[in-house]
Amino acid sequence: MIAKLFEAGADVFRLNMSHLPREKLKERVAMIRAVEAKFKRPIAILADLQGPKLRVGAFAGDSAMLEKGQNFTLDADTAPGNAERVHLPHPEILSSLEPGHTVLIDDGKLRLRVKSVKPGSATTSVEVAGKISNRKGVSLPDTVIPVAAMTDKDRSDLEAALDAGVDWIALSFVQRPEDVAEVKKVARGRALVMAKLEKPQAITRLDEIMEISDAVMVARGDLGVEMPLEKVPGIQKRIVRTARRLGKPVVVATQMLESMITSPVPTRAEVSDVATAVFDGADAVMLSAESASGQYPVDAVATMSRIAEEVEQDQNYWSIMRTLNTEPEATGSDAIAAGAHQIADTLNLKTIAAWTSSGSTAFRIARERPNSTVVALTPSQDTARRLALVWGVHPIRTKDASDIDDMAFRACKFAVREGYSAIGDRIIIVAGVPFGTPGATNMVRIAFVNQEHAAQA
């Protein structure tokens, strides 16, 4: 099935640690690596940490009915709950709630407003009534909780994921940049870190969080619970544009083709939603239940891939990308990336070949959104896999170039072999001299593809 999903267009596979037992992690990674070896194409693996799941306790009769306007207490008492009160097994929440704060239960199906607080309890008024049952989730849109985004389970899962050799770590329920810094400190470069933006507190500190993250995810499910639904599309655009400006990959996720969990075709609104994310300039669009537990996983991936391909052939897409382009930073690598984009545009070149050790050259070129395929040539398997997430990048692992002629020859050879260029085409090559020095992008070269390159391919 993983092979079928890859053939249908998947570049990255997410392992959701909320559902995957830690002891099965290595087996699942090995399965994906076997598919990678079969197709001889780098595949990225993203381990998604569960994060702190906040839940109410249990009820005497498994549930209770709350009436609008009644008082309902959240407290530290472990006794089973009833229609007046329930245990909240999170002392850090009880100590952080303030009068006026909103408490959402069960993905916002019930809404409570805090009236008063005292040590060990908070009295609320029921604003949206309904049935409340055992261990339903709690969301706190107004409250900054003094708890790290990583639980003890997450720390164990993180170590297991790093040991298994995953490429990206996604951190759930980020509130502050320090949350991301904690994961990066543990990862120490063994995997890149993606911040999932799903809390209002993260949006208020968006620039700081994005600055420290290697990539971000617009996790619209929880974001749409904790914030008014109508605000989510605007926030999505803001996050994607900020990520573009910073040259950080951005993933748009949640309910993208939700109806395909049970239907072989999506709704027209879902098609528009996926297309909008691509038009916005997202690096990747993500499926969840559609491919994890749905009835039509291959169809869902193929549908999403077709939508993305169609959008990127639309003339409006390229005019939007040009409009959203931001000035390059005052660094040599940014100037060269922008220059490569301009040269490729002027000469209508189909391929930009980027020799890269750390991947940063490919990241910077992708930020420019050139209307050319970026073939990233790297001696590092880790770098090749990480780049599978990045917009428009086709990563290839190969030994480093020995000199400038070898660099040009093999770039042309791979462009032909991968089907991006033909004899008589020109390609543009970006690299750093001396070879193998990370962050030393300092050279652009234009090369002609000839018969010898095709013969070697």
Image (cartoon, rainbow, N blue to C red):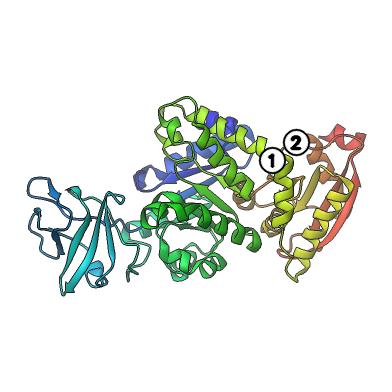
SS label for mark 1:
loop
Q: Going by the picture, which residue comes out furthest to the top?
A: 264
**Residue type at tag 2:** Glu
Q: Where is residue 26 in the image (x, y as percent from the top left)?
A: 43, 44
Q: How crowded is mark 1: few (under 14 residues within 10 Å), some or many (20 or more)?
A: some
Near-viewer residue (137 or 45): 137
Say whether residue 49 is visible: no
Near-viewer residue (266 or 183): 266
The numbered disc on residue 343 is: none
Q: Earlier in the sequence, mark 2 or mark 1?
A: 1
Q: Where is residue 338 in the image (x, y as percent from the top left)?
A: 78, 59
Q: Going by the picture, which residue comes out furthest to the front?
A: 69
Q: Residue at x 80, y 44 (%)?
A: 351
Q: Residue at x 7, y 58 (%)?
A: 79
SS label for mark 2:
loop
Of the two numbered discs 2 and 1 in the rendering, the one whose residue sits closer to the viewer:
1
Residue holding disc 2: 418
Say whether residue 113 is visible: yes
Q: In which quarter of the image is residue 448?
A: top right
Near-viewer residue (65 or 107): 65
Q: Residue at x 52, y 48 (%)?
A: 252
Tell whether 325 sits left or right of 217. Answer: right
Q: Going by the picture, which residue comes out furthest to the bottom?
A: 119
**Residue type at tag 1:** Glu
Q: In which quarter of the image is the C terminus?
A: top right
Q: Position of residue 220 (x, y in %)?
A: 45, 50
Residues marked 2 and 1 touching at CB (< 8 Å):
no
Residue holding disc 1: 312
Query: Rounded to the nearest whole Å, what is the CA distance between mark 2 and mark 1?
Result: 19 Å
